[in-house]
Image (tube, coloured by chain):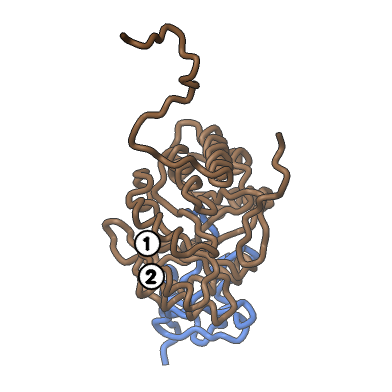
Chain colours: A brown, B blue
Amino acid sequence: MAEATPDQLTLYGEHFDSRFLLGTALYQSPTIMRDAIKASRCNIVTLGLRRQNPGNRDGDIFWQYIEDSGCKLLPNTAGCKSVKEAVTLARMSREMFDTPWIKLEVVGDDYNLQPDPFGLVEASEILLKEGFKVLPYCTDDLIVCQKLLDVGCEVLMPWGSPIGTGKGLLNRYNLKTLRERIKDVPMIIDAGLGAPSQAAEAMEMGFDGILLNTAVAKAQNPPLMAEAFADALTAGRKAYRAGLMQERQTASPSTPTIGQPFWHQSN
Amino acid sequence: MSTVISVSLNNEPFTLEPDTLLSDALEQWHYGEQKIAVAINGEFVPRSRYRETRLKERDQLDIVKPVGGG
């Protein structure tokens, strides 16, 4: 039976049919990226800004495909290690892509690319005051998330695990706590997912969406993997809305025990 | 006074006439109508200021374009 009510994702007042946000890096070719975006059925793609030397037109076809996708653009500040760098790159992005939306990243450590929570809160506050719609890439720390909400973020994007690791949901306790304590703010699991089952689990836990890149781009067949993730998100979301059963320690037969054949009261 | 100034463009050295406008430098460097954004010495320079921003000795320019990102 078709779903009776629309179940859209709402971020900063904008509504999206898909809960899947897809990255545009690491694909073997722009064509494969284009096909993966289409197969993912996503409405939002992330992208970055990097130095480009004069006369180099390598990125033109990439940009053409992004524009043709019709997706909303979510530029990032990937690689920025200070508040100043992140704020400057966000301002450059706003002009370049004509959007106030920014996936804000302030890297705190080169080893695990863990977000710097202090810099993230500070940069968020600056950019929100300038009219940006900040989607902060953050850890699963409850207090950091609360501070991000305090300065005005309307979306949170906690990590599942470090970027590019494919380790899935590393700290389920923290993530469940986040969902329990922050009920009314959209939260998107961003980074670290490697398999569609992990995305489905996050959706079952009540998270509002998934943002990933590597798991699709580095699959042997990226468009097929994009479709697999899209299906997993849909399944996980439906499961969350349907309400999962309570887990039990002891077995309980599903088939009725009354009328069980071959059973006879022992003498 | 020196007849040229040295600036850094994306970490590469370039020489320009003193007081060159940013808009003229971008033309010299063949950025043309490409989709770019510019920062000088770590500060964003909006497109509306390209024609009034003059480059100085040792200015460090970052010129960026869209790339794939996660």
Residue at which label 2 appears: A144
Label 2 amino acid?
Answer: Val
Rendering coords of residue A192 (x, y %): 39, 49
Occupied quadrant, residue B41? bottom left
Q: Chain of mark 1?
A: A
Q: Height in image: B24 above or below A54? A: below
Q: Are marks 2 and 1 in contact (CB under 8 Å)?
A: yes
Left or right: A52 as drawn, with respect to A10? left
| Point 54% across, 61% down: residue | A186
Q: Quadrant of the C terminus of chain A?
A: top left
Can you see residue A189? yes
Rendering coords of residue A45 (x, y %): 57, 53
Left or right: A47 as drawn, with respect to A38? left
- Which residue is more in the foreground, A236 or B20? A236
Rendering coords of residue B45 (x, y %): 54, 79
Rendering coords of residue B53 (x, y %): 56, 85
Label 1, secondary structure: give it: loop
| Point 53% across, 86% down: residue | B54
Can you see residue A33? no
Residue at which label 1 appears: A139
| Point 31% across, 66% down: residue | A108
Q: Quadrant of the N terminus of chain A?
A: top right
Tag 2 and tag 1 share a subunit: yes
Left or right: B16 as drawn, with respect to B52? left
Residue occupying the far front of the picture: A267
- Which residue is more in the foreground, A111 or A21? A21
Q: Which label's residue is closer to the chain start, 2 or 1?
A: 1
Occupied quadrant, residue A106? bottom left
Label 1 amino acid?
Answer: Thr
- Which residue is more in the foreground, A226 or B62? A226
